[in-house]
Amino acid sequence: MTSRTMPPPPMQPYLQLPDETGALVLLTGILGASTNWLTLHYLYSFLKPPPSAAATTAAAHRDKKNDDDDDDDDDDEEASVLLVSFLRDFTFWKHSAARLGLDIVSLARRGKFGYVEGLSTSLFSSAAPAPTPAAAAAAAGARALPDRSGRRIVEQVGWQQQQQQQQQQQQQQQGWKKTLTSSNIAHLRKVLHGAVDGLLRARSSSSSSTSSSTGAGSGKVVLVIDQFDLLLAAAGEQDGVSEQTVHELLLDLREKVHTTILTLAADEPLVVAQTTALEKEHATFVRSLAHEAKMVLSLRVLDTGAAKEVSGVMRITGGGGDDSGMPIEDKEYLYYIGGHGGVCVLERG
């Protein structure tokens, strides 16, 4: 990773894995100030490749007296990440992570990364009608039809059904990558819990083989959910989706992982206006999570408008769920996202 794309020095303390289990970090953005770059830097912080042997040896001699800090770094290297994305597809995350030096497909094959695709064409579509007997037979593989001479011929499965079967086979082969096919809360709960459990099993088996030879720990799993609040806008009561049910699902998932990183929209119409039922539910969801979070990182555009070398403002505050005894100091930074993907962060004076 080059110096142009590595996390800016002012950001590095905030990108570390929290010590306490069950911590929640909340990232909020608005139109014109997306949390994409911030989420990617969190992914890099947790999944960054180990340093070279030479760098490791030099660091060991240089930091010999800081054994505790070295142990914390080892824990960070052992972290695994489950990314659940409701607004951006896998191709976006794959290519964006590659620009930071992360090969998430390779990491997934090693049991360090999992992905759940929430941006699918069928996720928020209406329920399909029950298939007819003929359609059910066709889905099974073939359907017998008589021709004019009275002989029977076999109609093979259409190319669309073949493609679906191939996609299902690929998903079975890539157990680390799953797709949400319904906005029903029961389906969401089943898939998300299954993805977390699968990554935990992968990490457990990987760490078992590692610890037998090196004595290493079992590692930690980090859950990153991008735009979880989209469910409130795109689904409804017919799917069992509400602020309460989504919040309960999140609480259940947080109990299984070490840390949860959550990105939400915090535009003024969604949080302040509250003139519709959706706006009220969204505001309740965001505020309740802010009270539970250890830390809140909020992105917004400049109050004075656009600037040539300033993309936006990042405000960092401690959340209501910080029980560490070391309160986070409120700070504001100006950030600039370059065309090459690098980010420059400066403390606001």
Image (spheres, grey):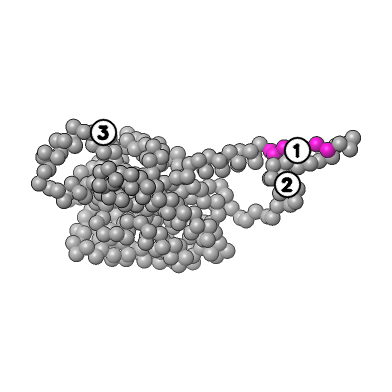
Q: Nearer the viewer, residue 114 or 278?
A: 114
* Residue 101 locus on image (x, y percent): 32, 35
The extreme front residue here reads 212
Residue at 19 percent of width and 37 percent of height: 56
Tag 2 and tag 1, C-beta contact below 8 Å? no
Q: Is residue 183 above or below residue 144?
A: below
Q: CA distance from mark 2 to mark 1?
A: 10 Å
* Element type at mark 3: loop
Residue at 38 percent of width and 44 percent of height: 111
Query: In the image, is residue 58 part of the stretch drawn in magenta?
Result: no
For the residue carrying disc 1, how many other residues have a C-alpha within 10 Å: few (<14), some (14-19), or many (20+)?
few
* Residue 197 locus on image (x, y percent): 42, 54
* Residue 212 locus on image (x, y percent): 29, 45
Q: Nearer the viewer, residue 187 or 272?
A: 187
Query: In the image, is residue 157 part of the stretch drawn in magenta?
Result: yes
2 or 1: tag closer to the N-terminus = 2
- Judging by the rendered image, the residue that carries numbered circle 3 is 2
Q: Amino acid at mark 2?
A: Ala
Q: Which residues are magenta?
A: 152-158
Q: CA distance from mark 3 to mark 2?
A: 56 Å
Q: CA distance from mark 3 to mark 1?
A: 56 Å
Q: Is residue 335 above or below residue 99?
A: below
* Residue 173 locus on image (x, y percent): 50, 40
Q: Which mark is residue 155?
A: 1
Q: Nearer the viewer, mark 3 or mark 1?
A: 1
- Judging by the rendered image, the residue that carries numbered circle 2 is 137
